[in-house]
Amino acid sequence: MYAAYDTGFLGRAQSVRPRKTRGQSSSEVTLRLSQGQFLFHQGDDGESIYQVTEGVLRLSRVTEKGRQQVIAFGYPGDIVGFPVEGRRNTDCDALTGARVRVLPARLPREGSGPAAESAFLAAAALFEIGNMQDHLMTLGRKSSRERVSSFLHALLRRIGRHDADGIRIDLPMSRTDIADFLGLRTETVSRAFTDLREAGIIELPTAQRVTVLDPGRLEETAEAD
């Protein structure tokens, strides 16, 4: 169920340095990450949170046995990095080239301008996290095919792009990452993808791309009891 965790990769990861872009205010900082680069590690001090503006991030934890457990994926608009008792409770690395906006981890007092904006973003993200936790609880009552369908349907609604063949979904994460996230085995996820393809619901042009042929049936499969 768990992907092997490459401890050597931590030492090879490059440190992230702030980079201001033209037109930024003095209080706003953007970080750019290359594919495979870590934004933060489990146990780091959590002085900032981050809003994803480009790319896809992966949040994961390391188990006591040294294996990686995927907790979530961060897409543009998501806010990641909320500390627990002042420290990060996950690792976060970039599955693609990515960019994030740095925000204060502590909610500022009432006011206007950047402080009020940060407070709004943080409060909204906390609300979203609560909804995500509720959603993950429902996944525990679904079959493997229903879980994979739910995952694809959520991505379809968020990042799906229409093309000549259907609705395209790009998957920068591996099947093992998806399996970890859904609480399944990698081979089970692969079999669910195959079942959906054979049912005429999706096509699999490549391992990293899904074309949804029948969004209605995908949604029905995702919501099946």
Image (cartoon, rainbow, N blue to C red):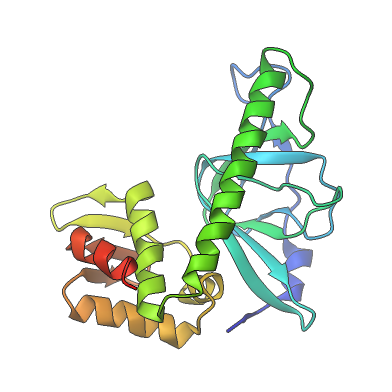
Relative vertical location of residue 165 with respect to residue 144 in this rendering, above or below: above
Relative vertical location of residue 110 with respect to residue 208 in this rendering, above or below: above
Q: Quadrant of the N terminus?
A: bottom right
The residue lying at 50 percent from left, 81 percent from top is 184
Q: What percent of the width, then of the height, locates residue 144?
A: 41, 80
Q: What percent of the width, then of the height, locates residue 52?
A: 57, 41
204 left or right of 208 in image: left
The residue lying at 33 percent from left, 67 percent from top is 222
21 left or right of 197 in image: right
Residue 93 figure quarter: bottom right
173 left or right of 92 in image: left
The residue lying at 17 percent from left, 57 percent from top is 166
Residue 185 seen in the current view: yes
Q: Residue furthest top?
A: 112
Q: Residue furthest front?
A: 225
The residue lying at 34 percent from left, 59 percent from top is 153
Q: Quadrant of the C terminus?
A: bottom left
Q: What percent of the width, then of the height, locates residue 79?
A: 61, 42
